[in-house]
Image (tube, helix red, strand yellow):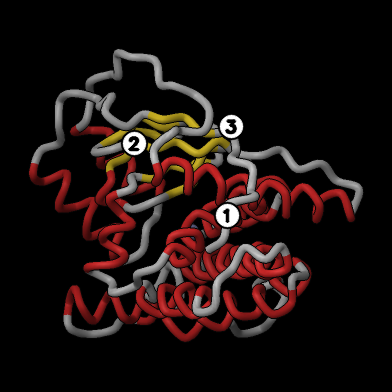
């Protein structure tokens, strides 16, 4: 990526090195890891973590763009998403309220309960914050074989996509509609967040922030974190009914759609019969 001219966002809370003390029991960690890799449902996973992680943070976290290289990268990607979504919201006479990105390591107390890095990056609608442990980026490269800075940016843009869903009301609508169709709704929310990540990527390209090969990095990452791919790795077989994020093919398709179109209305995963 070419982020030299991009202003770093100040909406970053740096909790790295602050920690929470305590530490989770082995059981808690195992449950959370499985729950995340088979698709992450914050309401169940975080409650499990809540029971085992108990102690509070003691120090105040610094706010603003961090100075280190990775912190700068994350703050610039966030700044880029703010520029894009502010413009898109303005076009429909809306106002974009940017989320805060929290960097942490190990575990963190969020507005959705205690979370830990094994769960991967997530968005908490209650406090409108994105939570990322940067060690996930190493996992993305080593474990999921999805290297590259734009693959990392896609992860951030996907969580920002969930924030957009909170702002435009989709998330609340779908939360109340949950029930027997719960997994189906979850898949459609996730695929829409992928598509929204693509929308950002579309404009990042227009702003000359992308290098040759960047788009392929993100597409490769989308394939690598598909539910079917992860299930196969974890349990040796695929259970489509248990999908919560969508298959590799679905994730690829919706990310690509966003990248190609740049129009949020093309990300209507709920309007189309099948995804
Ligand atoms: Zn998601």
Q: Which mark is residue 104?
A: 2
Check disc 1: other Cα within 10 Å, few if <14, some if 14-19, many if 20+: some
Q: CA distance from mark 3 to mark 1?
A: 15 Å
The structure residue drawn at horizontal position 53% and vertical position 59%, both measured from the top left corner, is 158
Q: Is residue 121 visible?
A: yes
State the CA–CA distance, disc 2 to disc 1: 23 Å
Where is residue 271 shown, x and y percent of the image?
Answer: 72, 75
Q: Earlier in the sequence, mark 2 or mark 1?
A: 1
As displayed, is residue 9 above or below residue 32?
A: above
Nearer to the camera, 88 or 206: 206
Residue located beneath label 1 in the image: 3
Q: CA distance from mark 3 to mark 2?
A: 16 Å
Asked whether, in this view, residue 210 is left or right of residue 73, the answer is right
Residue drawn where x is 47% and y is 42% of the image: 72
* Residue found at x 64% / y 52%: 81
Label 2, ligand 1: CB separation under 8 Å: no
Is residue 197 positioned above or below 115 on the image?
Answer: below
Residue shown at 71% from the left, 49% from the top = 169
Q: Which residue is mark 3?
A: 10
């Amino acid at each position: 990526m070419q982020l030299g001219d991009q202003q770093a966002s100040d909406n970053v809370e740096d909790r790295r090195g602050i920690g929470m003390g305590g530490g989770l029991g082995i059981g808690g960690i195992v449950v959370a890891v499985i729950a995340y890799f088979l698709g992450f449902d914050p309401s169940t996973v975080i409650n499990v973590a809540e029971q085992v992680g108990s102690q509070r943070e003691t120090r105040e976290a610094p706010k603003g763009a961090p100075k280190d290289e990775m912190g700068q990268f994350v703050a610039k990607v966030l700044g880029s998403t703010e520029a894009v979504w502010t413009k898109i919201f303005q076009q429909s006479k809306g106002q974009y309220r940017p989320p805060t990105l929290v960097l942490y390591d190990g575990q963190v107390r969020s507005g959705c309960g205690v979370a830990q890095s094994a769960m991967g990056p997530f968005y908490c609608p209650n406090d409108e914050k994105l939570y990322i442990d940067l060690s996930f980026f190493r996992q993305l490269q080593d474990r999921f074989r999805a290297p590259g800075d734009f693959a990392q940016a896609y992860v951030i843009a996907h969580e920002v996509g969930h924030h957009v869903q909170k702002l435009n009301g989709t998330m609340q609508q779908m939360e109340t509609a949950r029930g027997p169709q719960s997994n189906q709704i979850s898949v459609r929310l996730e695929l829409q967040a992928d598509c929204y990540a693509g929308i950002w990527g579309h404009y990042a390209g227009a702003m000359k922030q992308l290098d040759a090969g960047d788009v392929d990095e993100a597409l490769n990452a989308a394939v690598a974190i598909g539910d079917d791919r992860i299930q196969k790795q974890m349990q040796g077989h695929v259970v489509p009914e248990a999908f919560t994020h969508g298959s590799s093919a679905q994730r690829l398709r919706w990310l690509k759609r966003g990248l190609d179109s740049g129009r949020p209305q093309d990300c209507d995963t709920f309007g189309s019969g099948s995804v």
